[in-house]
Amino acid sequence: MMVIIAIATTKLTFAQSKTDVAFNQLLTAYYDVKNALAADKKDVAKEKVKVLSAKVDAIPHKDLPATQHTTWMEQAKLIKAKATELAAGKDIKTQRKSFEGISYAMIKTVRNIKFNNATIYVQHCPMAKASWLNEKENIENPYYGSMMFDCGDVTETIKSK
């Protein structure tokens, strides 16, 4: 009996760590898109969002608990749709609008699944009326880029798990 419990616990821990790694790779891909938009690099954002989309597909979601699985499936669908929009965006303004949808889905995912291995800062730009995730506390505004690079506030800090 003790051996079965140990095996089940080990399997769950391994599955969780594999899932956590995949989610953190997704988060890194998200930051790459955010950083490209903050630097006004629409062509880089277009390429980086393709990586983000692939990372969504790579999440081993079947091992998630039921409520987290439901959350992920809903948010993954939104992220993929907005990533497709962003990749097709002809101008940076359109890309930034698509990124807003990606950001809201990522914020909901991080809050509900709590996979992050580093502190995440939820930041908000009152001019754009939009939020995003940042790996740094310093504001790097993806919605206005160089025009208003440091416009915004940290509205929430999500500590690593």
Image (cartoon, rainbow, N blue to C red):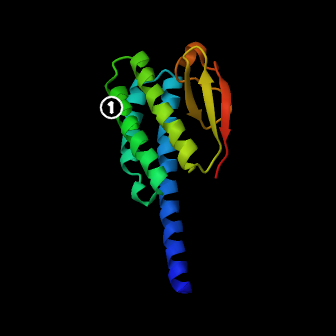
Query: Which amino acid type is shown beneath numbered disc 1?
Result: Thr
Q: Which residue lies under the disc numbered 1?
A: 84
Q: Residue at x 53, y 73 (%)?
A: 10
Q: Position of residue 34 (x, y in %)?
A: 51, 30
Q: Residue at x 54, y 37 (%)?
A: 107
Q: Position of residue 48 (x, y in %)?
A: 41, 35
Residue 60 showing in the rendered view? no
- Can you tell which quarter of the image residue 45 is in? top left
Residue occupying the far front of the picture: 67
Number of other residues with Cα within 10 Å of mark 1, as a class: few under 14, some 14 to 19, many 20 or more: some
Q: Residue at x 41, y 25 (%)?
A: 98
How many numbered marks does the figure carry?
1
Please state which of residues 95 and 61 is positioned toward the viewer in this rendering. 61
Residue 143 showing in the rendered view? yes
Q: Quick check: 105 above or below 139?
A: below
> Relative to residue 69, is residue 156 drawn left or right?
right
Please state which of residues 1 and 139 is positioned toward the viewer in this rendering. 1
Q: Quick check: 74 above or below 81?
A: below
Q: Where is residue 101 in the image (x, y as percent from the top left)?
A: 44, 28
Q: Is mark 1 on a helix, strand or loop?
A: helix
- Can you tell which quarter of the image residue 128 is in? top right
Q: Position of residue 105 (x, y in %)?
A: 47, 35
> Relative to residue 87, is residue 26 drawn left or right?
right
